[in-house]
Amino acid sequence: MNAIKNKHKAKNKYRNDMKKMILALVLASVSVTCFGCNKDGDSSDVSAEPTETLSLADMTQPLQFSYGNGVGSDAKEPKEDATEGDKNSDSSSDSEQDASKSSLETAPDKPVNVTEYVEVTDASGQPVTDAAGKVQTEVVNVTEQVQVTDPSGQPVTDTAGKTQTEVVNVTEKPAATSPTEGNASSGGEEEKPTEAVSYTPVMDVCNAYWLDMSQESDFFFNGEFLSIEFKVNEGIPDGSYPVTFKKTDIASWDVVKWDPVCINGEVAVNSDVAAQDDFPDEDFALKINSVAAKQGDTVKVTVDLNNNPGFCGFVIELEYDKSALTIVSTESGADFDNAVNYVMN
């Protein structure tokens, strides 16, 4: 009988030691995930490797947010009345990412290419979808066919007399920023200059990470989970600016990694908010709640969860366009706060 008890004790000790080691690695990976930085870009303290004296009370990491590191995926132009697939797509070219290094730039003399969203299709012409069934899209230059002319401006024709054409990119030149002279129709008053803004999306990631092993159990709650306050930047085009899940690592006390259903959201600027899916009846799910706004507004985007199976740690990444949206503040949601404070008190 004693041999059996000793065997169980040894097994339980091994299990707890394994949890300590795994969660210490999780904590270390959090530091790596967030580039060792807090939201102001300062370096964070990284704990030393776990020792034999490490207790579960030490395995805690208060809720932290990190953003402004410029580690998002390739940028896409916003589009009014975009489809759900448009909002959740991550496909774009490296050249577009290079072009997105500058944010809102004034370019009064340099024409810019007009772009649009198009669905990515396979060789048979069918839409390409990702693992979640979302239709993939990409940003392409808008083109048009124009007549080919000679140096004198006359149309060029082939041997059969047919006018030659070529495909060129459609460009637009921002309006001049200098004020115009007063005229009779304006009563001699000087007109206000028109802002010349060339919009370039720049995608970024907001990381949220938290760990609490001190209770030796999971935290159970539903409702408001995380909250991010965005300032909608001035001068951006009207349209949909998606806020999407890029990563959801959520772990339980039993070292089970949950894979929730993710419902993405948007900030709709001077446009209608697209309908969002409801929470599934039984599956664990996270939802970014969409909001409507206009340029210059400050809006709160919340993340809710439902059918929570219980967890004690997570690393969540939310992707957004920082050319359009500037993070003002971040905090835990009311229901997450209540659950943690209730258990700890």
Image (cartoon, grey):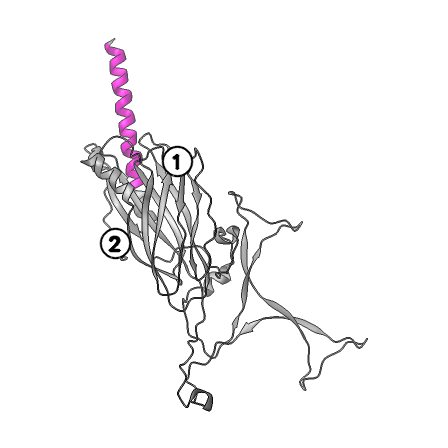
Chain-order first, disc 1 or disc 2: 2
- Place of residue 153 in the rendered image (x, y in percent of width and height, measured from the top left): 67, 84
Mark 2 packing: few (<14 Cα in 10 Å), some, or many (20+)? few
Residue range of the region highlighted in magenta in the rendering: 2-27
**Distance Cα–Cα, label 1 vs label 2:** 29 Å
Residue occupied by mark 2? 43
Question: Which is the main secondary structure of the residues drawn in magenta?
Answer: helix
x 41%, y 81%: residue:
193
Q: Which of 344 and 248 is in front in this view?
A: 344
Q: In this view, does 227 lie to the left or right of 278?
A: left
Q: In this view, does 37 lie to the left or right of 322?
A: left
Q: Quadrant of the C terminus?
A: top left
Rendered position, 262 above or below 196: above
Quarter assignment of residue 308:
top left
- Place of residue 207 in the rendered image (x, y in percent of width and height, measured from the top left): 34, 50
Of badges 1 and 2, nearer the viewer stands 1
- Place of residue 44 in the rendered image (x, y in percent of width and height, measured from the top left): 24, 51
The extreme top residue here reads: 1
Residue 242 in sight here: yes
Residue 324: within the magenta?
no
Res 258 label:
1
Residue 49 in sight here: no
Quarter assignment of residue 224:
top left
Q: Nearer the viewer, residue 265 or 99?
A: 265
Mark 1 packing: few (<14 Cα in 10 Å), some, or many (20+)? some
Q: In which quarter of the image is the N terminus?
A: top left
